[in-house]
Image (tube, helix red, strand yellow):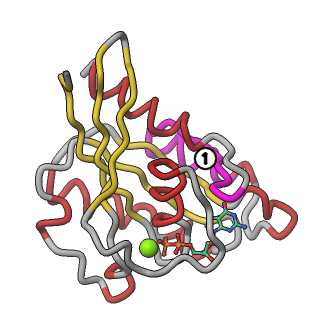
Amino acid sequence: DIEVAIKVVIVGNGAVGKSSMIQRYCKGIFTKDYKKTIGVDFLERQIEFNDEDVRLMLWDTAGQEEFDAITKSYYRGAQAGVLVFSTVDRDSFEAIDKWRVKVEDEVGNIPLVLVQNKIDLVEQAVLEPEEAEALAKRMKLRFYRTSVKENLNVEDVFRYLTERYIER
Ligand code: GDP
Ligand code: MG
């Protein structure tokens, strides 16, 4: 029996890898030219945590982030959130504060985590590792570096949020 279901919102600028992360985590696949929308509001995955069955519902923005049109219904009832930026997109890094404000304006204080995706492209990084660490420290957020492409650390992100949610 499912005891806990958690709505997780994944936010960040366009092209940082949000849809890919959801696909990777819920379907176990990565595609290079993954479509903008997944056609549904969310994908889900069931995991075990402390002998409980937990259902994670990962909500995708379907590209609306690009014209600032994310609707209230996207955020409504969110119980955890992932703030994502890309190793190769400086703007996405600088937009993280704004994304946190948006989430918290809609749903208040929920467990959040900071993610630097596309770490496989570290050779082309547009920020220093210390900058990302300083951001996480200032925002008081747990920080993960992921590669959705190489399937690096993706599971850890959602396990951490699950733990934070359950032990809240
Ligand atoms: P979204 O707009 O945030 O949903 O980003 P997408 O999931 O659509 O990804 C944008 C592009 O980045 C796509 O071409 C993905 O294949 C690519 N991408 C996503 N994650 C990674 C990653 O970890 N490494 C690399 N190299 N490319 C990635
Ligand atoms: Mg997307």
Q: Nearer the viewer, residue 80 or 126?
A: 80
Horizontal placement of 74 versus 10: left or right?
A: left
Q: Is residue 92 above or below residue 113?
A: below
Q: Say whether residue 21 is magenta.
A: no
Q: Quadrant of the N terminus?
A: top left
Ligand 2: which quarter? bottom left
Residue range highlighted in magenta? 131-149
Q: Quadrant of residue 118?
A: bottom right
Residue 56, horizontal then vertical, whole percent: 31, 40
Q: Position of residue 28 (x, y in %)?
A: 56, 50
The quadrant holding residue 113 is top left
Tell me the SS state at disc 1: helix
| Residue 138, percent from left and from top | 49, 44
Classify residue 7 as left or right of residue 148.
left
Q: Position of residue 72 (x, y in %)?
A: 12, 68
142 falls in the magenta region: yes
- The three-letter amino acid code for the residue at tag 1 is Ala
Most foreground residue, 81 or 29:
29
**Image point (43%, 55%), residue name:** 83
Q: How many marks?
A: 1
Q: Is residue 10 above or below residue 1?
A: below
At x 48%, y 80%, the residue is 35
- Whether disc 1's CB lies below 8 Å from ligand 1 is answered no
Q: Nearer the viewer, residue 78 or 42?
A: 42
Disc 1 target residue: 134
Residue lying furthest top = 51
The vertical placement of 62 against 161, above or below, is: below
Task: Work out which quarter of the rendered image holds the C terminus and state it.
Answer: top left
Query: Which residue corresponds to the image point at 66% horizontal and 74% vertical from the top-left?
Result: 32
| Residue 126 quadrant | bottom right
